[in-house]
Image: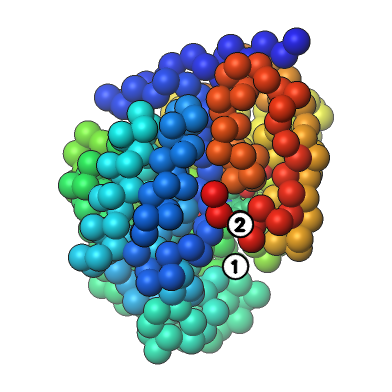
Amino acid sequence: MTDVSPLFKPFRLRALQLENRIVMAPMTRSRSPEGFPNAENEAYYGRRAAAGVGLILSEGTTTRRRGSSDDSHVPQFWGEKPLAGWKRVIDAVHQAGGKMGPQLWHLGMSRRPGSGPFPDAPSDSPSGITLKGKKVSEEPSEAEVLDMAQAYADAAGDAKRLGFDCVELHGAHAYLIDEFFWERTNQRTDRFGGSIEKRAEFAAETIRRCRAAIGELPLIIRISQWKSVDYGAKVAVNPQELERWVRVLADAGVDAIHCSQRRILEPEFPEVDGPKGLNLAGWVKKLSGLPTISVGSVGLTSEFTGAFRGEGSAVGKLDETIERLDRGEFDLVAVGRALLQDPEWALKVRQNRLSELRDYDASALQTYY
Ligand SMILES: Cc1cc2nc3c(=O)[nH]c(=O)nc-3n(C[C@H](O)[C@H](O)[C@H](O)COP(=O)(O)O)c2cc1C
């Protein structure tokens, strides 16, 4: 029988006490047709809190920059109605005994031009360069860049005011913050571009501004090597570069790093520590000294991008993920599709009802429960 107990050890992030190590991964569902959370959204998160998810990270929720969203069904994290909706969500989660933080999102150049609630707004970026490397607009001024950073901080301050338990910055997957990290999209020559440290400076500025807005509330940043347009891309090609990258984030005052991988068991630098070597969260923890969240196909056999091509995924073993958690390679485990499919996933795992875990069915994206 699989020993699931390491998943159910408590964990503390600053003053935030989590009952277990299971995190609901942020998942965009586009189920807020008017741009603000509704009663269905409250029930969706409340259900997962009631069934024992340790920490819920919300779907990406956008900042006040007009170009931050490409979908008016994605909930915003600014303005009166959206914030009132989010207040009801966090109250529902707390009532069910859960903890939750919003994932603050700005799509940057991943936004389709002319899309979202403000189709006429320009898309923000570090250098006016698309994900394919094409220059399409002027480089924003330093003042504009600082306003992009402040927009996250304004949302973070609102999260604290509404009673959320933490805040996550979406710094992964070729969205705005990641476009600053990535050489292809960041060609700036001021303090926000150049070396890996300088490309991390936008994230650092954002972290510092968020910290000023939220005080002691835990702040997480999600990063990834892979990009939506290039799964093989790497911001850091070796542990030395990775250390320089994450050191900037740690020094800026972030509390934890959420390391997005498509497959949790994939080693990040197998040429250094072999085919069973540390994954990205393992390396980031070792090099930054910060707690990390790992993610990617937990409890399933295939990776998540298939979900957008209508693919399902069979239930997979949890043993090696739990062993790595138990060894301290990373601290928390985020679960995406398995929790999208089954709100009771955490409860079933805790009660060792593993035979009741369900395959991820492609149709789960069409339903909302
Ligand atoms: C429907 C769906 C929506 C997603 N939306 C987001 C998002 O808003 N922000 C984000 O950082 N990742 C997003 N992801 C990625 C997940 O957070 C997670 O990293 C990925 O699904 C891998 O976990 P899994 O294999 O357990 O599903 C999304 C994934 C899915 C399936």
Instruction: Report the mark closest to the observer, 1 or 2.
Output: 2
Q: Is residue 210 above or below residue 18?
A: below
Please indicate whether residue 228 sits to the left or right of residue 56 in the image: right
- Residue 114 appears in the figure: yes
Asked which secondary structure carries label 1, the reply is: loop
Residue 242 in the image, given as x and y percentages of width and height: 56, 41
Q: Residues under labels 1 and 2: Cα distance?
A: 37 Å
Residue at the image position 72 percent from the left and 13 percent from the top? 2
Residue type for callout 2: Thr
The residue closer to the viewer here, 352 or 329, is 352
To which quarter of the image does residue 124 belong?
A: bottom left
Count of numbered circles in the view: 2
Label 1 CA crowd tier, 10 Å (few <14, some 14–19, many 20+): some
Residue 107 image point, x, y percent: 47, 67
Frontmost residue, 324 versus 42? 42
Say the numbered circle drawn on residue 122: none
Position of 167 compared to 22: left or right?
left
Q: Report if residue 191 is visible in the image.
A: no
Q: Residue at x 35, y 39 (%)?
A: 93
At mark 2, the secondary structure is: loop
Answer with the quarter of the image where residue 228 lies.
bottom right
**Residue at 45% from the left image edge and 78% from the top image edge:** 116
- For image coordinates 76% across by 63% down, the residue present is 309
- Amino acid, disc 1: Arg
Crowdedness near tag 2: few (<14), some (14–19) or many (≥20) residues, C-alpha within 10 Å = few
Which residue is more in the foreground, 208 or 199? 208
Direction from residue 305 to residue 243 in the image, left or right: left
Numbered label attached to residue 184: 1
Mark 1–mark 2 CB contact (< 8 Å): no
Image-based side of 183 in relation to 201, left or right: right
* The label number, if any, that marks residue 367 in the structure image: 2
